[in-house]
Image (cartoon, grey):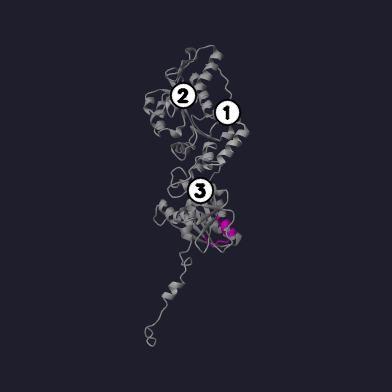
Amino acid sequence: MATLQFNLHPAQTEIHAHPARFKIVAAGRRFGKTVFSVIRCFEEALATVNDRGILLNDSSEVIYVGIDREQAKRNAWPYFKKFAQEIEAATGLHVRLLEKTSLVELPPELGGTRIRLMGMDDPDAARGMKIRFAVLDEYADMPPRVWPEIIRPALADVRGGALFIGTPKGRNHFYELVEQAIPLDEWGVFNYSMDDNPLIEAEERAALAAEYARGSSDLYDQEIKAQFIASSGQLFNQGDFRIVDAMPSEECDTFLAVDLAGFSSDPDRKNEKRKLDDTAIAIVKVNAQGHWFVVDIQHGQWGVRETALRIVKAAKDHQIQIIGIEKGALMNAVEPYMREYMAKYNRWFEIKPLTHGNQRKYDRVQWALQGRAEKGDISLLKGEWNEKFLDQAVSFPSRYVHDDLVDALAYIDQMVPETLNNFDISGFEAATQFHPVDPRAGY
């Protein structure tokens, strides 16, 4: 096997050093995804044994897969030619490059492995191949079935690896793959901004940020920061919620509702924490007109004692008399510790069990929040929790995004008393005042 030296910047080095068999790199434009991928293709093609200890020969191939072959060739072929020339210079051996078929063939002295550029505009072309390593470039734009139906089975013979690269495109199957991969041992997930490439000068990064600032901040977050952005969903748009710098000076009633999650017993068990929802504590002020001002939504994965303490402290700090908690086993678990902390602080609160009312979560959230949000009747006090709440709201309902903050806020609807205080009833009272027909009889 030839020994070659490739120059990687620190973020690329971090990806390279990770032992995962399958790696996902969601990165911003100009991070260096393509160069890194081409380097990995040559490394895997030159290998005689892979990281799983499987002996390799020229019966298996390396593939670089683009949205279509033209895109793959346009993005990567110049780098394949460049590194092929470097291999020739280092070894004195000829690397065969077939322009028409986009094929790189190493000489027999270096193993004779082929690197093939392919497009997923015809996914079935890869069926039946024996693949030792695959790069999937811009996986977000490929058909979702490409990985599970075609590429993954082709890696089985030699337990081959794969590298997914791309820039996020909302909450599609690329995002789904990321969410599924995070807790799995064989997978590594990496998320980098263009700013993580030190070869892009600071002045150029600043200029790009300024240009995007004149347009869509979502586009900048997606294309440069590589964030999985969703600005609208089935029930809510980001613009439905107004963020305010201060609470109103008018008199308001304050309510607290809690959506409990499973309690994390060991903070060092990252996979366990990843699977759990957050416990969410929503504190909301409601004025006489029925406008909701969301003061705070505390959230986190805590043990049962810390959860109880946070609930009691929030009620004490905001001078709340009634704490609403979703009825069930989790409420039963946390309630004794809450009463213990109430005694400690000498502050007693009523604990009101909240119920689903035999409604699906979608219906309950829609009934409690959608109409208010569309009318602009929910304002959020500026805070670090805003971003997470908005992300959950515009993604709701989703299998791949938690909804605990949204659920806690929806429970406030059960806390607000149903009264006629929001209506002008003076005319109604006058119209319904009792006037006896016969004053002497009284009727």
Q: Earlier in the sequence, mark 3 or mark 2?
A: 2
* Magenta-highlighted residues: 311-322
Element carrying mark 2: helix
Name the residue type under label 1. Answer: Thr
Measured as percent of width and height from the top left, residue 144 is found at 40, 34
Q: Nearer the viewer, residue 129 or 291?
A: 291
Q: Inspect the magenta stretch and tell me whether residue 318 lies in it.
A: yes
Name the residue type under label 2. Answer: Lys
Measured as percent of width and height from the top left, residue 412 is found at 49, 57
Element carrying mark 3: helix
> How far is disc 3 from disc 2 in space, using C-alphas?
39 Å
Element carrying mark 1: helix
| Callout in the foreground (3, 1) | 3
> How far is disc 3 from disc 1 in space, using C-alphas?
34 Å
Tell how many labels. Answer: 3
Q: Is residue 312 above or below residue 110?
A: below
Q: Earlier in the sequence, mark 3 or mark 1?
A: 1
Residue 300 in view of the camera: no
Which residue corresponds to mark 1? Answer: 13
> Horizontally, is 164 left or right of 202 in the view?
left
Which residue corresponds to mark 2? Answer: 73
- Residue at position x 55%, y 49% from top? 385
| Callout in the foreground (2, 1) | 2
- Residue at position x 47%, y 64% from top? 417
Q: Nearer the viewer, residue 196 or 280?
A: 196
Local packing at callout 1 (Cα closer than 10 Å; few below 14, some 14-19, many 20+) is few
Which residue corresponds to mark 3? Answer: 390
Query: Which residue is outermost to the top?
Result: 92
